[in-house]
Amino acid sequence: MSEEEQLLTDPKQEPEAAHVKEEPEELYRSQEADGIVLKQETDTFMVTPTYEQSDHGEPIGNHFLSPTSVPEESCGPEGSRHTDLLQSHVCKEEDALTDQNPCKQEDNFSLDQEQPEPQIKEEQVEFCTTQDELQLMDTKEFYGLRPRNFLALVPENPHDSDADLSDEEDKTEDPDYLPAQSAAEVIGDHSFESLDEEEMPSTSSTAPPRKKKKKGKNQLKTVHMQELDDPPDPRHSSGSKTGTRRIWNHTDIGKFQAPDSSFVLPDAIKTPFQYFKTLFTDEMIQHIAVQTNLYSAQELGDPIETSPEEIEDFLAMLLFMGIFNFPAIDDYWDLDSRFDVTADIMSKKRFKLLRRFIHFNDNQQCDGNPDRFYKIRPLFEMLREQCLLIPSTYKQSVDEVMVSYKGTRAGTLRQYIANKPNKWGYKIFCRASPSGIIHDLLLYQGPSTFFNRDLSEEERQLPLGSKVVTTLCKTITQPRLSVVFCDDYFTSFKLVHSLEINLGIKCVGTVRSNRIGGATLMEDKDLKKRGRGAFDYQSAEGVIAVKWYDNKCVTLLSNAYGVMPLSTVKRRSKDKKAKVAITCPSLIAAYNEHMEGIDLSDMLVHLYKTPAKSRRWYFPLFGYALDLSISNSWLVYKRDCGLLNEKPMPLKRFRLAVAHSLRRAKKPAPRVGLASSASPPPQTSFQKKRLSPRAPRPQPDVRFDNYGHWPRHTDSRGRCNLCPKGVSRWKCVKCNVFLCLMAKQECFVTYHQK
């Protein structure tokens, strides 16, 4: 009788444990002799059923453990987990099945080939009980139709590599270990996988080295097999910080076809004063007058009793002073340098009093307010609402503007930017069209910048630059058709990706090397060897990263424009001493064309800037709001003139026209200044008589306001301003022009009617 038959017939006889334990040792030695190497698979797990007994001796459930391929350490004679597990199963089955027949021999195990993976079947499971035999036992017949809970061992941290589960030493700890080059590095393939990790800004053009991950002991946990088959969460897309990898390829992306901007054709060109009042409204002027009286009453006990008309005169004087800039405010009223245009509007004492107490918010209602710009906030909010009403183009830009201020009363609200013309001042983020029209703005005040903006929890976790662009782009009327351009202060791979997913807006911008989402572009030194116009690009998830060499290397991210079609730009060559044509990708040309809107607006504001030197830290912001209203209204006026094919007036004349209208529209005739300074010097006998300059014509807002136009008889005669051949001694007090006033020729009445 064989040993197997004795074991099954006599259940009281204990099995020889030494005989069972010698089998894996003999198998292990024979495999070493034949040179067979067992490798550990990291992607698949072998499931081995184990059974637990209850208190009544009945099996409870099935558990599946151990990996598919057994490592070398587990095959040794001192502790084979797989062999001990099998031995325990055999012993339990032998005690329970005394009347069962022995397992039939299925086939022989050959040591000349690799050990096949055990197959889990629904009705039978193979177990190896001897060296040369595999016995099959029908578990379904013995245990009946019991529900099975399939379990598997997986790492407790899903981001840990399966290779870290082994007991092998980390090869990177060996100082003499040299990692082998991948095939992609050998053949020069640019396709690779990278992690999207946004690090601290770096001035270096090369990607910062990754920190070596410290390897520790990974823990295992038991999970159901059904959980492993569940589909992944779509929220954790590729390229997120969860550890998934983004694949970059050397491929181009398609061009986004943004529609051309179309505007409503106006019936006629409005006056400069009307364009100005669409931005700096009567409501704003009334608000300034009320708050100025309130603040002066709080400070002095009695209000200075100003009115909206007087505030308009004050604004007119500031507009004049922006064009005719004197060294000091007092010079406009001094006898030696008196400037009648401003000095005749208001006395110096009254002007300085208004400048001292002009105010925009109630200080007593601002206690505990997180807004650090509370003194000027109402004025900017009203101006912002009017700017949002201006029709915009589909291609806009986001950038920052510096309002010059060198004082110390504003505290940390004053910022410093070295590469700006005004290095010290307030920072304002703006969104503008390529024509220079500002459509939205955001005052920067540190952590509380977005206190009055509606942002989701996900948007509040974004970096500052991405949060600014997202906030300003939320007010775009047609986001699905729009493209936003921004510089490297704002641009990152996350911003480009989130703008398209959350708002549907395409984005193009220059980017720093540590924000490109892991794309490996050519080094600067390698790109310079190819000469000016050389470029390299990678794309992933519909976003392309391009590095282009002009005077220096510049990197851009885009999901609206790709590399093709290529164009050429003219650049000065030192060697040839002439301009040469160099290659330029498509997104570079689009960026240069549409990114200059805010710079253009900043230039127009600084052409005729309102003097804003004051001890009050908010007064420069008030001057910027006034200048921005002038520049925006002039750009809208210029656009309307282009639609009607009319020639627009320059910005200086536009500003003067607004100032004159503020001074005289719907107001009585101005008072005459000092006669000594206004009268010309006496003529001598040998001097020729010079003709006096022609009086300027009044603005239409003053001419047709039907207020304060009275005739005045003068000793001198003048040419009528309406009829070509008329001569009259009658003059309009308000318009200051000669007009015929006779029974047969009533030019005075006709001149003041539309």
Image (spheres, rainbow, N blue to C red):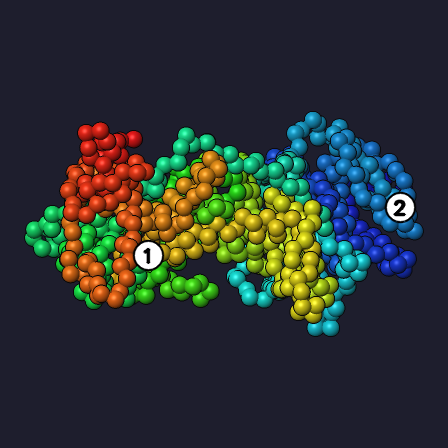
Neighbor class of circle 1 (other Cα within 10 Å; few <14, some 14-19, many 20+) is some
Q: Position of residue 244 (x, y in %)?
A: 62, 48
Residue at 16% x, 51% y: name it: 672
Q: Residue furthest front?
A: 685
Q: Which residue is mark 1?
A: 323
Tell me the distance, in whole angstroms, between the alpha carbons under discs 2 and 1: 101 Å
- Dot 2: what SS? loop
- Say above or below: 601 vs 708: below
Depth check: give the residue in front, 166 or 638. 638
Pick whichever of labels 2 and 1 is earlier in the sequence: 2
Residue at 88% x, 38% y: name it: 105
Q: Residue furthest left?
A: 301
Q: Which residue is mark 2?
A: 109
Q: Amino acid at mark 1?
A: Ile
Residue at 40% x, 63% y: name it: 422
Q: Amino acid at mark 2?
A: Phe
Q: Position of residue 381 (x, y in %)?
A: 32, 44
